[in-house]
Image: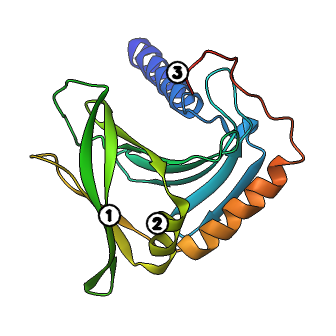
Amino acid sequence: MKYIITSLMCLIALTAVVAIFFMTTTSFAADDLFYKNTSGQWDVFGHPGNSTLNPACVMQTNWNDRSKLLIIQDLADGELYIHFTNNNWNVKGPYQTNHELVLNFYKGNGIYASFKASFTLTNKNSIVIRGIKHEVFLDPFTESDRMVFVMPGDVPNITVGLRGTMNVIDYVKECMSASKNEKLRFPKKGQDT
């Protein structure tokens, strides 16, 4: 009986340690944020920056398997870019290589807008799309029902619902205004962002 109680206590302690680990290992620690808001499945937050990341306003949506899409407005240089992690992918390298995808926006049963984008495969389940033009992306993002990343080869496509995106854009504007009252941190010169 004593062995069972000791084992149960160890299991509870181990579970608590694992839970704390997962809560504290996100890229954007909640206590560092200068802005937070939610619209539909989208979270919007402002990150003040650190030694490797420029300050940014971020739109994020998550899946149950911990996959996530981040649309990032860099506050240092104005760049809009996407980081997507799909935990169901297992793409073979080479990594840090450039590829092309098609981004389709649907409204009802038809395509509202479509454009090609270059992306970098950063690891087996993550891509980054840099240099997105605001004028090309934001209108379809707010006016469409869903967007589909049409991936090359045998990599499964990604469909993202766009419920709540009109408010998300307003929240990003609020985040950008809030950033003016914050002490933002910029990476040291010579470091990648």
Residue 95 badge:
none
Label 3 or label 2, whichever comes before in sequence order? 3
Q: CA distance from mark 3 to mark 1?
A: 50 Å
Left or right of 147: which side holds 78?
A: right
User: For the residue labelled by badge 1, is the local secondary structure a helix, a strand or a loop?
Assistant: strand
**Dot 3 amino acid type:** Ala
Q: Which residue is mark 1?
A: 115
Q: Residues within 10 Å of mark 2 (few under 14, many from 20)?
A: few
Determine whether 27 is above or below 100 in the image. Answer: above
* Circle 3 residue: 13
The secondary element bearing badge 2 is classed as helix
13 vs 156, nearest the viewer: 156
Between marks 2 and 1, how big is the CA–CA gap?
8 Å
Camera-side mark, 3 or 1: 1
Q: Answer with mark 2 or mark 1, whichever residue precedes in sequence.
A: 1
User: Which comes before the other along the chain, label 3 or label 1?
Assistant: 3
**At label 1, which amino acid type do we have?**
Phe
Report x, y in % for residue 81. Answer: 49, 47
Is disc 3 surrounded by few (<14), some (14 to 19) or many (20+) residues within 10 Å?
few
Q: Amino acid at mark 2?
A: Val
Q: State the residue at coordinates (25%, 86%).
A: 109
Residue on which disc 2 sits: 136
Quadrant showing the N terminus? top left
* Residue drawn 18% across the image and 34% down it: 91
